[in-house]
Amino acid sequence: MFSRLQAVRHYSAPQMKKSGFTIVNALKYVKEVDDYQEQLGKSASANVLATTLVDRIQDKPELLSLLSLFHHELAKLGITPTSARDFSTLQVWRYRSMYFWKLARIHNVFWDQCRLLDIAERAHRLGFSPTTIGVLDPINFTQYYSELQSGIYKGLDFRHIELMGPTRFQLEKGTH
């Protein structure tokens, strides 16, 4: 089964010619890969991808907790499903600072775990602007948002999940 899936992915992805002008072939290959990635990104809308994502992670409390944490951090910046999408300069710079400190880390861990569990098939990037957040933008989760923020989704309680990292990790006094 794995080799068949690998073969399907292998043939659908661009291939680099290894004969002739190496530099020209490499540049053509890079362009083909960019076009292929763009085609993958446009093949489904973010709302459809978000719905599919929630359906696939509904029984995984760790991923639900990471998604909830990501949305919680965005809510601190005023980015919710109902918030206006015309951001002030201050909001954009606050988003960019949070991008480096928390958002990119949470986003990358979430998608890495999704790829490890065969939920996601490709890499997803978090945009550097609050208007280009991507699939995990709260506006794509309007029907699930309140349930995810409550810590209980379809009867699965994920409030007990403790995430380790710079956002929640604290050393207890007297452990040294």
Image: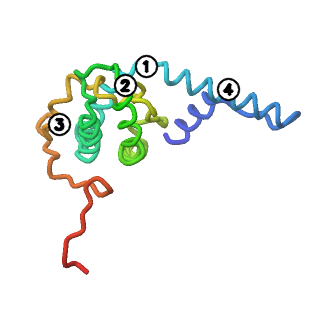
- The residue at which mark 3 appears reads as 149
Q: Circle 1 is placed at which residue position?
A: 44
Q: Who comes first in sequence, dot 2 or dot 4?
A: 4
The vertical placement of 24 against 171, above or below, is: above
How many marks can you see?
Answer: 4
Q: State the image coordinates of residue 173 (x, y, percent, origin top left).
A: 19, 74
- Left or right: residue 23 versus residue 163 is right
Please, what secondary structure does the residue beneath circle 3 have?
A: helix
Marks 1 & 2, CB-CB < 8 Å contact: yes
Residue type beneath disc 2: Leu
Q: Earlier in the sequence, mark 1 or mark 2?
A: 1
The structure residue drawn at horizontal position 43% and vertical position 42%, both measured from the top left corner, is 115
Badge 3 local density, few (<14 within 10 Å), some, or many (20+)? some
Residue 176 vs residue 49, the one in the foreground: 176
Side (left or right) of 150 relative to 19: left
Which residue is depicted at the point 28% across and 19% down?
84
- Residue behind mark 4: 32
Q: Residue furthest right?
A: 20
Whether residues under marks 1 and 4 lie with C-beta atoms below 8 angstroms apart, the answer is: no
79 left or right of 29? left
Q: Amino acid at mark 1?
A: Ala
Image quadrant for the C terminus? Answer: bottom left
Q: Which residue is mark 2?
A: 49
